[in-house]
Amino acid sequence: MSAEGHVVQFAPRSEVPQYIESQNPATGEVLGRVPVLDDGEIKAAVARAREAQARWKTLSVAERGKRLLGFRNALVERQKEVCEIISREQGKTFFEALSMEVLSVIDSVTYFANNAASILAPEPIPLHLMKHKVSYLHFTPLGVVGIIAPWNFPFAIPTTDAAMAWMAGNAVVLKPSEMTPLIALKTKEIWDSVAGLDPDLFQIVTGYGAAGAALIDSGVDKVVFTGSTKTGRLVAEACGRNLTPCTLELGGKAPAIVCDDADLERAAGALTWGAFANSGQVCASVERVFVSESVYEPLVEKIVAIAKSLRQGEGMKDDVDIGALTFPPGIPRIERLVADAVAKGATLRTGGKLKDGPGHFFEPTVLTNVTLDMEIMHTESFGPLMPIMKVKDEHEALRHANNSDMALLGYVFSKDHTRARGIAEKLEVGTCMINDVLATHAFPETPWHGLKKSGLGVTHSAAGLKAMCRMQHVSDSRVNLLTRELWWYPYSKSFTDQMSSMVRAGFKGGALTRLLFGG
Ligand code: NAD
């Protein structure tokens, strides 16, 4: 790729391996290899997508939906195949591949296929002053959407984003993570098999970070990036150079606040699943737990008991709760966070180390007596670690929870919904779940977005679908009786005075203002 002007210089093409070998992180088995595409091949993929998009955008939204339901049906039919490749290439359990990825995509495709027409219908804007005018929003496709995906949900994240892009009338070029390219190619194979879907409307460009950078530079009309905050900054800079719109879904450090009136059984179950599902490799993972002192000991006992009972192993085997870590270079960070916490006085209640033997399995780890000077309370672990800190009450918990740059998800546990919502609304995160964790990524109606350094823009929901469109405002007049508007030429002293009097009469705050504007 042309690295000129880039903040990051990628290795010269001659030094980059020409193929990526995909391995099963649980066994080391080589699953296949995919090419590392160069700039020219990526540009050619975008050009093919652009031609297909010119045909796709002429279809009604309803017709696009009908065809996308064909894709949904094929996914339903071939769900086992998809779950298998997810589990084998990414390492999560087969059940998680089904429940957290495949089912969620099948449902989201169904939702957007069935609801995009009403969400994208022209949207009237009532005007409070210019009553002789009519305004509405009109949504048109962007063109080609470049999706750059991470490895932790290699199917659910890009395919849900792609479904929104397609329904909005766009083509998609997907750059999967170098850790999980085969899952993307399987998705494409299924897409290509569906009658009525143009294969060129969905392109996969495989490669390392340089391929992502080349995709951004290839002239795509929008970039949807999901990955680390560090890479997200580079993506934002690159998009900024071309003024390409981008949505960034970045890292998290989700806090959980457990009040003294929480249902401890439910809280323990939710927190352990929230910290250890997908081996803790979830942007929304429970990464910091703040527990009110009066329920601290009983809750910790329950959490430790559940953590100790979890069965770890190859995701394709039956009766496994936790699969493998996908990304070996992330292991030293996980180990460092545990060692730092223990060195500073945390108690290791269970877990704490990488298991012996083939594959990358880090034990589900619970640390108590955690304090704020420990790095584990600030750096995203992206591993199966649950640090638990005792606090006086939810006020102290909120202060600590909000003292973070990461603000994707947050969680509150209390039986009192009024109290829980009061805390939730003060938590500085894009989504706060009450008495539950993680799940809203699979609710297509609800937005998914990070605040602070956890992201820019929004995906999922009506807002996410509209973000896959150009939003055009059309302004018309109700009647054609006026030959001119009041503010057109010619200007005159007398009309300036009249306007000044009108401003005074209309906006000065008396009965007329209330009548016109309500206050
Ligand atoms: P990453 O940032 O290392 O890589 C993400 C993608 O970006 C990969 O496809 C990679 O090849 C590509 N890339 C790397 N350098 C690039 C560049 N300069 N230009 C363009 N593309 C480039 O992230 P990861 O390790 O794959 O994923 C883990 C991170 O993603 C965690 O921080 C996690 O919290 C975050 N994440 C966030 C969400 C969310 O919805 N907010 C969801 C999943 C994961």
Image: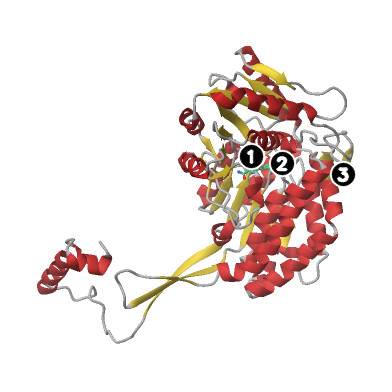
Label 3–label 2 contact, CB within 8 A: no
Where's ligand 1: which quadrant?
top right
Q: Quick one: SS at disc 1?
A: loop
Q: Amino acid at mark 1?
A: Cys
Q: Is residue 117 above or below residue 240?
A: below
Label 3–label 1 contact, CB within 8 A: no
> Does the numbered disc 1 mark a residue whose Cβ is under 8 Å from ligand 1?
yes
Which residue occupies 83% across, 55% down? 79
Residue 40 visible in the displayed image = no
Residue 345 visible in the displayed image = yes
Considering only order in the chain, which callout, 1 or 2, is on the residue closer to the N terminus? 2
Q: Nearer the viewer, residue 406 or 509?
A: 509
> Does the numbered disc 2 mark a residue whose Cβ is under 8 Å from ligand 1?
yes
Considering only order in the chain, which callout, 1 or 3, is on the residue closer to the N terminus? 3
CA separation in Å, label 3 and label 1: 27 Å
Q: Amino acid at mark 3?
A: Gly
Q: Amino acid at mark 2?
A: Asn
How far across and down, in percent of the image, does residue 9 sit?
A: 62, 36
Considering only order in the chain, which callout, 2 or 3, is on the residue closer to the N terminus? 3
Q: Which mark is residue 152?
A: 2
Displayed quadrant of residue 374:
top right
Residue position for label 3: 32
Displayed quadrant of residue 385:
top right
CA separation in Å, label 3 and label 2: 19 Å
